[in-house]
Image: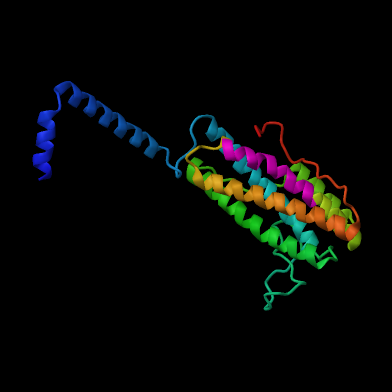
């Protein structure tokens, strides 16, 4: 029946119209093929490729700098203790750094630091995987200049309440420096890279919520309700 119907249609449609239909069909197939070539598993095209490579290197180094900051707050342990809900447990030490005793006296800050440390280790690995899959680039994390300054500030701050406040301000500033580049990622990365869009979206939400959580702690616990985070951690050659 389908073949008969197709034959009837073929006979009833003028030759010029059939040619137009064929042309439109081939054009449609070409668009589908082009859309398929913009695979989320492939490299970005044109300027998006340059942006993506710069952003992924930036976020790897940015997160890497945060690991040491959170270790200073939560302390380090070489292995996990048996209880899941141990409030004194630390994090695994960053390569190149020794074991650290927790300098934060606030249990909430130590908990937040452990969570941030684990999350950012995973985000580093994901960004490294994107770089390798899309661009064949292997990038080992490096401390940023601003990250080194922040770490030095926290290392020199006495443990206890003074460290608590300094950490909340310093880590808020660190979070803020990743917020604008990650917002730009939503509109500057390749339109087909859904995985990268979701990655950047998650960082925006996490950084924003983390900043406001720390601002709330500064206000409620230390009376510092007028703190405004300031950005840093950006190289001059980055188009963010």
- From the image, give the main secondary structure of the stretch colored magenta: helix
Residue 14, horizontal then vertical, whole percent: 14, 24
Answer with the quarter of the image where residue 80 lies.
bottom right
Where does residue 186 sit, x and y in percent of width and height? 58, 40
Residue 183 falls within the magenta-colored stretch = yes
Q: Is residue 238 above or below residue 64?
A: above
What quarter of the picture does the N terminus occupy? top left
User: Residue 37 is drawn in which quadrant?
Assistant: top left
| Pick the front one: 8 or 86 | 8
Q: Is residue 82 left or right of residue 24?
A: right
**Residue sitting at the far top:** 16
* Res. 215 visible in picture: yes
Which quadrant does the C terminus fall into? top right
Task: Count every numbered label the image shows and give the total.
Answer: 0
Residue at 18 percent across and 21 percent down: it is 16
Q: Residue at x 53, y 50 (%)?
A: 129
Q: Is residue 209 magenta?
A: no
Residue stretch rendered in magenta on the structure: 171-187
**Residue 122 falls left or right of residue 190:** right
Q: Is residue 141 visible?
A: no
Above or below 112: residue 6: above
Residue lying at 69% horizontally and 46% vertically, measured from the top left: 62
Identify the coloring: rainbow
- The extreme front residue here reads 12
| 53 lies left or right of 64 | left
Measuring from the top left, give residue 142's x and y in whole percent: 68, 47
Q: Residue at x 65, y 55 (%)?
A: 120
Please state if 113 lies on the left or on the right of 127 as rendered. right
Residue 124, x across and y down, in percent: 61, 52
């Amino acid at each position: 029946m389908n073949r008969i119907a197709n034959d009837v249609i073929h006979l009833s449609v003028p030759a010029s119209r059939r040619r137009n239909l064929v042309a439109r069909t081939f054009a449609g197939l070409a668009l589908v093929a082009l859309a398929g070539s913009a695979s989320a598993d492939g490299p970005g095209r044109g300027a998006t490729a340059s942006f993506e490579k710069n952003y992924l290197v930036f976020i790897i180094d940015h997160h890497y700098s945060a690991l040491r900051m959170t270790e200073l707050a939560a302390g380090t342990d070489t292995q996990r203790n048996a209880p899941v809900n141990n409030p004194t447990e630390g994090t695994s030490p960053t390569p190149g750094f020794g074991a650290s005793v927790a300098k934060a006296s606030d249990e909430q800050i130590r908990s937040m630091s452990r969570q941030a440390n684990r999350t950012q280790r995973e985000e580093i690995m994901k960004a490294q995987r994107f770089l390798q899959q899309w661009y064949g680039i292997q990038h080992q994390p490096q401390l940023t200049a601003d990250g080194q300054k922040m770490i030095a500030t926290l290392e020199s701050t006495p443990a206890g309440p003074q460290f608590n406040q300094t950490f909340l301000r310093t880590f808020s500033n660190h979070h803020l420096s990743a917020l604008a580049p990650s917002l730009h990622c939503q509109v500057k990365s390749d339109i087909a890279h859904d995985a990268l869009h979701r990655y950047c979206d998650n960082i925006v939400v996490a950084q924003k919520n983390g900043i406001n959580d720390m601002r709330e702690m500064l206000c409620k616990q230390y009376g510092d309700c007028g703190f405004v985070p300031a950005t840093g951690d950006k190289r001059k050659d980055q188009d963010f």
